[in-house]
Image (spheres, rainbow, N blue to C red):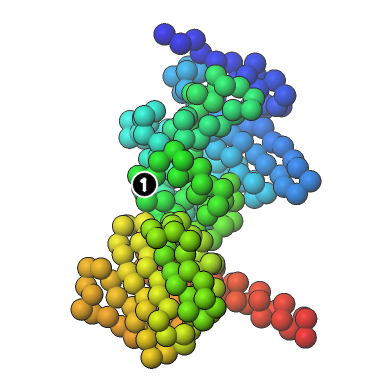
Amino acid sequence: MVAPLDLQRELPKEKLVRFTPLPGAVKFTGRTPLHQFATYILPWDDGNWFAAFSCRDSIDDDLAALVLRFVDGRKRLFEESTPLTILDGFHAPGYGFDCVAVLSPTAANHFRAQSAALSKRTFVVFPIFRCEFVGDETVDCIWVMRHDTVTTVDMKRSPSPAFTMYFENKKIGIKSTQQEPALTRLGFLIRQLEQMDGADGSLVDLQNYRNEKCSLLVDEGKFKVSTERHPENAMHLSLAETRDWLLHFLCGENYADAKAAEAREEKTAARKKVNND
């Protein structure tokens, strides 16, 4: 039987303070030249296991308490051997998140620089939009996604849908470097669509977080959009219509949050253009 860990001993450089909303929980903060961070830790089983939640810049104790309490009541739904578990049914006032992700100690590799012992016993938890993960990601895939496609410590982020993409852009003569679709950011997809607009023969193949597939082909100046399930129902759409359809396809139940974020970004871009002019 493993011995319980003492958090202050495992994290001697951190100033741990009691996080009073949850019995036994602690919190510590940190700062870099660009960001402020906070980490909340909830011990389980008398210090044999831990849940950790970290956030950047937008530090919200109420959100941290909701996330940790939500996971604490569902411990039977995840285990150490499963890299990622998605817990549905989460809600936090003022946020659009609808799920909480739980990473196993191996997938999270948290506290690795401070304490190997603590890292091996810590599940990392964070709120997500359902569209941000498929749910069956490997340890390596989770690492790539958290570094390249979704900033899980940013509580003010807009939905960052998980999807793979293969493309051929005939207008500028570039295409995917791999034959198989690869993880891609939404912003990159949008830029490709804007460049492809009117460039016949350009194409995009996508697979969303529900493992649904669709294809886009630029044909006679329009985007011919079809799904793997119903290829006979192909649609010929304008660029604006295609963007909106794809936002539905990629974000699913998080479409409204994604659409609101898109509107904010367009307003910000318009304001910058006016200022520059």
The residue where tag 1 is placed is: 135
Q: Specify the quadrant of the image occupied by residue 131.
A: bottom left
Q: Is residue 203 left or right of residue 187?
A: left
Residue at the image position 51 percent from the left and 71 percent from the top: 174
From what the image shows, is residue 58 above or below residue 21?
below
Taking the spot 30% from the left edge, 83% from the top edge, the residue there is: 235
Q: Is residue 230 above or below residue 23?
A: below
Callout 1 amino acid: Gly
Image quarter of the N terminus: top left
At 25% from the left edge and 68% from the top edge, which residue is drawn? 228
Give the residue displayed 40% in from the left and 54% down from the top.
130
Q: Return the residue found at the far bottom.
A: 220
Q: Is residue 158 left or right of residue 271?
A: left
Res. 39 image quadrant = top right
- Where does residue 52 sit, x and y in percent of width and height? 54, 33
Spot occupied by residue 268 in the image (x, y as percentages of width and height):
66, 74
User: Which of the pair 118/216 is nearer the observer?
Assistant: 216
Residue 157 vs 22, above or below: the answer is below
Judging from the image, what secondary structure is the residue with disc 1 in?
loop
